[in-house]
Amino acid sequence: EFYCNLLSTATGSMDSCLMVWNFKPNMRSYRFVGHKDAILSVQFSPSGHLVASASRDKSVRLWIPSVKGESTAFKAHTATVRSVNFSSDGLNLLTASDDKTLKVWSVHRQKFQLSLTQHMNWVRCARFSPDNRLIVSGSDDKTVKLWDRNTKECIHTYFQHGGFVNHVEFHPSGTCIAAAGTDSTVKVWDIRTNKLLQHYQVHNGPVNQSSFHPSGNYLITSSNDCTLKILDLLEGRLFFTLHGHQEPVTATAFSRNGEYFASGGADEQVIVWRTNFDKVDVTQRPFTGATRSMTMTILEQRMSMTEDKVKECLDNQHKLIARHAE
């Protein structure tokens, strides 16, 4: 999996290595070794000065993404750690594990703060709300749970999934959550009313991950059917299908400014795509009617595990810009 900020992409893989790809001002890639088993989740801190990684080795590591690649490791759980997520202020880290628990840690001292324990099976994903007051989690018990961070209470449980819940995500406004599962569906709930707002069944296989565009008007999803889908949340419909991977697409994320998104797959490829929603200012919320009829330009940058390959890809950028998803 991986997480995109404006200038870098971090990827974790089954080979237990963390890769950080820097695009500006100069293309560079760093390979960090420390985990003893597969890395299942990574995320940049809001400042970009740290990268957190979660692994099957039951540990979480905090890395300084520099040449030295220094890291601090702490045993976070008693089983595989599947998810890491920084709070929006960068002070706390949320982890989710096969030991059926969620845990919150202080980033500065890696000190344990609290544990949430009502799931009945593996917890695959957990996220802070934008204001850090709430937590959402998805589990193999086929539920999505909404938690109050201060009281540690489960506020609501959503039961509508027909399979394991692979991924959960807060809408940028903090009023809605999206959940993706092995039943091939993506569901969007309003957490104020706990009502199901939208239900998408556009994939032909389990949906592994999703990411909201910073505008909140689009959601990208990745699936075992080897595709990425862009969902238009304003219209409640499928907007675009992307065919770039040859095997299941295991992860996807928008950059912080929404100009790019990246996807990673079982085909050992990471593809960075350029998103061009008619060059709309993403700070405008919601979009006006004039900007809804938009176009998307795709720039594919395929990254292997060597810096030379990435460099070559960027050198050929002018050739790739002409390529559009069919």
Image: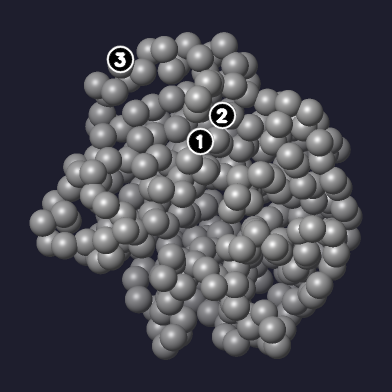
Estimate the spatial distance between the alpha carbons at disc 3 and disc 1, rounded to whole Å. Answer: 22 Å
Name the amino acid type tagged 2.
Answer: Asn
Residue 95 place in picture, x, y as percent: 73, 61
User: Label 3: which residue?
Assistant: 319
| Secondary structure state at the residue bearing disc 1 | loop
User: Label 1: which residue?
Assistant: 7
Residue 97 place in picture, x, y as percent: 76, 61
| Secondary structure state at the residue bearing disc 3 | helix
Horizontal side of 171 relative to 16 (left or right) equals left
Q: Is residue 38 visible?
A: yes
- Quarter holding the N terminus? top right
Q: Which mark is residue 22?
A: 2
Residue 301 place in picture, x, y as percent: 43, 25
| Secondary structure state at the residue bearing disc 2 | strand
> Mark 2 or 3 closer to N-term?
2
Q: Nearer the viewer, mark 2 or mark 3?
A: 2
Q: Is residue 148 above or below residue 316?
A: below
Q: Are marks 1 and 2 in contact (CB under 8 Å)?
A: yes
Q: Is residue 13 visible?
A: no
Q: Are marks 2 and 3 in contact (CB under 8 Å)?
A: no
Name the amino acid type tagged 3.
Answer: Lys
Q: Residue at x 61, y 45 (%)?
A: 48
Q: Residue at x 69, y 45 (%)?
A: 50
Name the amino acid type tagged 1.
Answer: Leu
